[in-house]
Amino acid sequence: MEETDAPALPLVQPLRDAGVDFTVHEHPVIRTAEDIRSRTDFPVERSVKVMAFTAEGGRVLLAAVPGPARLQYGRLAAAVGVRRSSLEPAGADVLAALDMEPGGVSPLCTRPDVTVVLDSAVPDMGRVFCGSGRADRTLELEAADILRMAHHPVVAGIAAPRGA
């Protein structure tokens, strides 16, 4: 695994401007927890899994949960005040508008109209690995910086442990 500061990533400059201590890791494309285990040396329990959704009125949501956890869709909907039935996975066109690609969804987004919803466990996870916008790059940074960088973050219990 090679480490680089990957200046082509749109998130790099805003992170630098905010004084965030981060590392960009370059690796083969990863999309699942199994990919993380087999293609990187990142500990899955230190990862933040992020899923992108659209909801009522074209609202875009980024939901971030600890890597081993499962997102609870009803809890996500309740946290942002939308109907569960209105949540739909964001398509490639929505991700492209966010400068992201499938497998690389990041909890960091420079667009102020995007709602970032963090599971209540995420801000206290310490140093974590999360999406960078690209499936072949991972950001390593303090979870508290994810919360600090979000424009209008929502912190709520949106995850359940695996097997629950």
Image: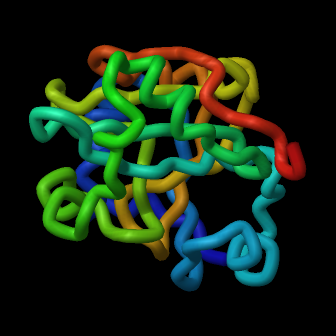
**With 47 as the anchor, is 118 left or right in this view?**
left
Please determine whether, in this image, residue 66 is positioned above or below residue 133.
Answer: above
Measured as percent of width and height from the top left, residue 13 is found at 26, 41
Total count of labels: 0
Residue at 38%, 23% in the rendered image: 149
**With 53 as the anchor, is 64 left or right in this view?**
right
Residue at 46%, 69% in the rendered image: 103
Residue at 73%, 74% in the rendered image: 40
> Which quadrant of the rendered structure holds the C terminus?
top right
Q: In the rendered image, is residue 109 in sight? A: yes
Measured as percent of width and height from the top left, residue 20 is found at 47, 28
Measured as percent of width and height from the top left, residue 96 is found at 17, 63
Could you say which quadrant of the image residue 17 lies in? top left
Measured as percent of width and height from the top left, residue 127 is found at 71, 35
**With 7 as the anchor, is 154 left or right in this view?**
right
Residue at 39%, 17% in the rendered image: 153
Q: Nearer the viewer, residue 5 or 140?
A: 140
Q: Which of 2 and 57 is in front in this view?
A: 57
**With 162 as the anchor, is 98 left or right in this view?**
left
The type of colouring in the image is rainbow
Q: In the rendered image, is residue 148 in sight? A: no
> Which quadrant of the rendered structure holds the N terminus?
bottom right
Please determine whether, in this image, residue 152 is positioned above or below residue 137.
Answer: above
Could you say which quadrant of the image residue 144 lies in? top right
Q: Which of 24 and 94 is in front in this view?
A: 94
> Extreme right residue here?
163
